[in-house]
Amino acid sequence: MARFVTVTSISFGGGSGTGPERYKNARETMLARIDDAATQSPDVILLPETFTALGCNQEDWIGSAEEITGPTPNAIAQKAREHGAYITCPIVERRDGKLHNAILLFNRKGDLAARYEKYFPTIGEMESGILPGTEAVVAETDMGRIGFLICFDLNFEELAEQLRKKKAELVLFSSMFRGGTLMSQWAVRNQCYLVSSTPRENSLIVNPMGRVLIESSDYQLTITKTINLDYAVLHLDYNHAKTAEIRKKYGPSVEMEVHSPEGRYMLTSNHPDKSANEIIQEFDLERLDDYFNRARKVRKEYLSK
């Protein structure tokens, strides 16, 4: 059954001034930007990495650290309640006397729904006192399973594999670097929607086939897209012959986006009563991972002969 989710990414380059004045200016500017974004009724709003301290030198960046009871998390939680949306709060978080580059996710009631600590801080961050996180995080929400990445994380396969095993459907990527083609590669590898928020241009919303749905620019710093999380990725082998039959029965309520160079397609259910998984079972289709695992199994059988 269709699970439509409206996703907003806000690109933002930081506040003006220095030290506490800069953090405050950044926070107040972002709160106004969130109010503007809320006119599109998003379900989730993504902000860039440590947004109160963007553009700061290393000392001021560390100096921006707040506890969860600090002014920035409180203000973001209030906006989440006010607009009935999930909102990320990426900050340098001080917790139990330790520092983390973190994303706090507040739910529609303004309660903390998830906390993710950057798994791969840069060497410079760690030398400045930032501790690495210890696990990938996937939050169960009323929209679906949401995972997180922060900046440098995008480069590491082991973190991608953890998120994939935890079946993240939508991954929120707060960053200072833009990612470029890594974004599409990452979405394809993990068969998930990937949304980024960066300081200015090139924030992206990418679908599980690696296609960019929308991209921010200096003329459009806030981007919004409605996506459907009731989807599955399949290989063309053994499945493609059945697509005509699916179209005949379900018409436009089932979308099939074919990417023939990669040999795969994405099935999305817009149907009010039938889920993608039910359609897969009805037509005896095979998900991509199941097909690859079957190929591994048959390979072993032939090797043993």
Image (cartoon, rainbow, N blue to C red):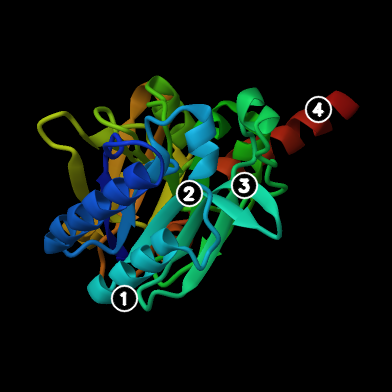
Q: Nearer the viewer, residue 121 or 225?
A: 121
Mark 1 = which residue?
81
Instruction: Tell me which residue sits at (49%, 58%) in the image.
Output: 104
Looking at the image, is mark 2 or mark 1 nearer the viewer? 2
- Quadrant including the N terminus: bottom left
Mark 3 = which residue?
100
Q: Earlier in the sequence, mark 2 or mark 1?
A: 1
Secondary structure of the residue carrying numbered label 1:
helix
Relative to 289, 227 lies left or right: left
Residue type of the residue flagged with mark 4: Tyr
Please give the label number shown on residue 302: 4
Mark 2 = which residue?
91
Give residue 15's position: percent from left, percent from top. Answer: 28, 40
Relative to 291, 47 lies left or right: left
Q: Quadrant of residue 122?
A: top right
Q: Is residue 239 visible?
A: no
Residue type of the residue flagged with mark 3: His
Residue type of the residue flagged with mark 1: Arg
Q: Decide: marks 3, 4 in contact (CB < 8 A)?
A: no
- Quadrant including the C terminus: top right
| CA distance separating discs 3 and 4 | 49 Å
Residue type of the residue flagged with mark 2: Ile
